[in-house]
Image (cartoon, rainbow, N blue to C red):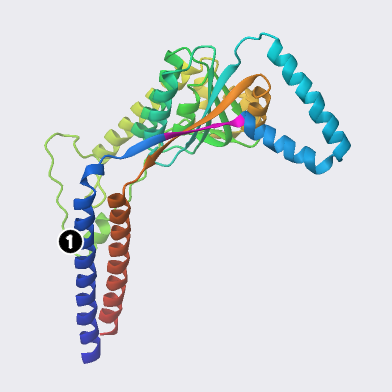
Amino acid sequence: MVFLLEYASFLLKTVTLVIAIIAVLAFIVSLKSRKNEAQKGHLNIQEMNEHFEKLHDQLEEAILDKDALKKLKKQRVKEDKANKNNAEEQKQRVFVLDFIGDIKASAVENLRQEITAILTIATPNDEVVLRLESPGGMVHGYGLAASQLSRIREANIPLTICVDKVAASGGYMMACIGNRIHAAPFAILGSIGVVAQIPNAHRLLKKHDIDYEVLTAGEYKRTMTVFGENTDKGREKFKEDLEITHKLFKTFVSDNRPQLAIDEIATGETWLGTDALEKKLVDSIITSDQYLMNKAKKANIYTVHYAIKKGLQEKIGLGAATTVDHVLTKASDNLNQLRFWR
């Protein structure tokens, strides 16, 4: 028993020392990096045509003999000269964006910068292709993401959405902004519905004689709670709010894709690509890779990605937070074990 108490005391001292050291290091780094507090981002731009050509050349070199390869290269040199001599119109430019969505639609921060950059140079003769992957999430996050895409439409620049895996719920809210939606055969689309799940621990607290007070000003300031006792009136109001959100969702989708039978598909169900085509949720069945390869024959394609560079202070801060959380978790586990043994 004495050993266990001494061990607990030693463990707490160690945790305190580790936290103090991390706090000092974080403070020192903070002083040195105040000049670079603001996050700096930059655009990464790559030409996809060159990427396709490299793949093609590598494969040719692997399977053709030297004579055939030499002959082919001579033929291409002649074709390139002919193309240069022929005055041709400027090729269409296609700007490719990627959006991989989480529950908060966190990627919207990068998306807004990418779209802003593209709008400074793109014209109605160009095209924006969004490779979208998202099962949905919070209404306000995906609402903002959809609004960012609307900026492209408002500038009269064609917007194409490619879905290889999933664009459901908030993901489909984004997808429906596109002039055209392309999906892979087994991509998941739809889920035009609203859901909220709230655990309630009121009975557990009551069982242990623990009171939880919820004080509000305004009849519906808090309709459902995690720890308080929920009422039928509160549930009805919460359900009413969900229905209002669902109605707005349906209207938004219907306005952007009037060809949909909205009441038929706004049931919260999802469909695979081929079935989604029948329901007019998408316009064609094709993967993003094939679509872009087809476009590369007549257009210059550029991937655009906005990367936010994290400063040293932020990196150390995140590392410190992770370390402290790990140490405290371990300490809590050990102390819980000590209490159990006692």
Image quarter of residue 239: top left
Residue 217 on the magenta span: no
Q: Position of residue 31 (x, y in %)?
A: 19, 52
Residue 193 seen in this snapshot: yes
Query: In screen coordinates, is 153 left or right of 59?
Result: left
User: In the picture shown, does residue 26 fall above or below 240?
Assistant: below
State which quadrant residue 290 falls in: top right
State the image coordinates of residue 283 (x, y, percent, origin top left).
Answer: 61, 21
Q: Quadrant of the C terminus?
A: bottom left
Residue that mark 1 sits on: 210
Q: At x 27% / y 81%, what residue is drawn?
A: 338
Query: Considering depth in this image, is 276 or 37 the residue closer to the camera?
Result: 37
What span is in magenta? Answer: 43-48
Residue 65: give x, y in percent of width and height.
87, 40
Q: Quadrant of the N terminus?
A: bottom left
Image-quadrant location for residue 223? top left
Q: Secondary structure at mark 1?
A: loop
Q: Residue at x 28, y 54 (%)?
A: 317
Q: Nearer the viewer, residue 96 or 76?
A: 76
35 and 127: which is toward the camera: 35
